[in-house]
Image (spheres, rainbow, N blue to C red):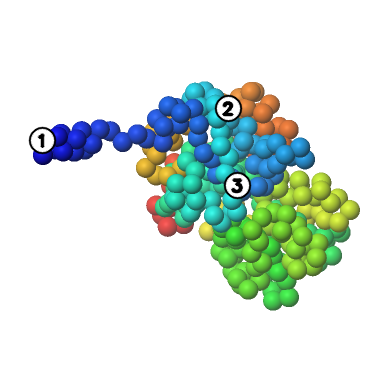
Amino acid sequence: MIVVSTALIWWLTTPIETSLERAQRTGMIRIGYAPEAPFAYRTASGELDGEAVVVISWVMQRLGISQLEWVQTEWADLIPGLQAGKFDLIASGMFITCERAQQLAFSQPTFALSHAILVKLDNPLQIQSFNDFRRPDRRLAVMRGAEEATIAQALGIDPQQLLFVPDVQTGLAAVLAGRADGLALTELSVDLLVQQAPDLVERAQPFVPPIIDGNLSIGYGAFAMRPADTHLRIAIDQQLLGFIGSDEHYALIAPFGFSREHLPNRSTASILQSCEHGS
């Protein structure tokens, strides 16, 4: 009985290893991503590349974590996968939003991007905004769980006018096949898809960016963790401080189409302040 009690006391008083401590002890961390250029995607040679990949790799090296195990999933499964413990953080160009902040802890932002719509070449329907899909004869493709779907519904677009797709390539195929009249993504994601099929699709221009609750909708991307992983979030933020916006940082992300205009000018706390006011 004494032995059992001693063992129980030891178990109760021994600190639980945090995700950061485990990663630093083993030198390995699992990272979830959904394929989408320019954030996290496979190159023609099969290598994983992108803004999120190079930035989090830089951070982890400085935390003494050299082995990054990347777990691919569909966009809509990123948050459930994190919650289920399939990986320890999300590095996939995920925007900081009030809704997601109820389930996730975000790092400081690493970029800021506006939204765009991919259409067939010459833009036959003259699409110039999300609002052009507020009619029953048009259909907008959006990734399930992505911010563009939330924006479309906030603008009053009937959910029946939305075609939910699991990834960007399926969205591109939907536009090419005529199953959708446009595909809503970030500006850089659209530009990269145009590079894939320049004779078939283009970015809708001129374009009126969406305005939600009187504010221009700009997406601030960050790494996402479980709320309980405070130590991991703080450690990542400490590395990002002074790095984001530096020449070294810009040299890493410029090859993926990012310019200095895409550098974030707000903190996570300021972005989430709107949540307190219900907007």
Residue at 10% from the left image edge and 35% from the top image edge: 2
What percent of the width, then of the height, locates residue 248? Answer: 63, 23
Q: Which tag, 3 or 1, sits closer to the chain's start?
A: 1
- Residue 268 shows which numbered tag? none
What percent of the width, then of the height, locates residue 84? Answer: 44, 51
| 24 over 74 or under it: above or below | above
The residue lying toward the viewer, choosing from 172 and 240, is 172
Residue at 70% from the left image edge and 36% from the top image edge: 47
- Residue 72 shows which numbered tag? 3
Residue at 68% from the left image edge and 57% from the top image edge: 184
Q: Viewed as shown, does residue 7 lie left or right of 208?
A: left
The residue lying toward the viewer, choosing from 198 and 277, is 198
What secondary structure is marked by label 2?
A: helix
Q: Do the residues labelled 3 and 1 touch (CB within 8 Å)?
A: no
Q: Viewed as shown, does residue 200 lie left or right of 273?
A: right
Which of the 4 quarters of the picture holds residue 162? Answer: bottom right
Viewer-side label of 3, 1 = 1
Residue 97 showing in the rendered view: no
Residue 28 showing in the rendered view: yes
- Residue 2 shows which numbered tag? 1
What percent of the width, then of the height, locates residue 201? Answer: 82, 56
On-image quarter of the N terminus: top left
What secondary structure is marked by label 3?
A: strand
Residue at 64% from the left image edge and 44% from the top image edge: 113
Q: Viewed as shown, does residue 142 lie left or right of 172?
A: left
Dot 1 amino acid type: Ile
| 272 over 58 or under it: above or below | below
What secondary structure is marked by label 1?
A: helix
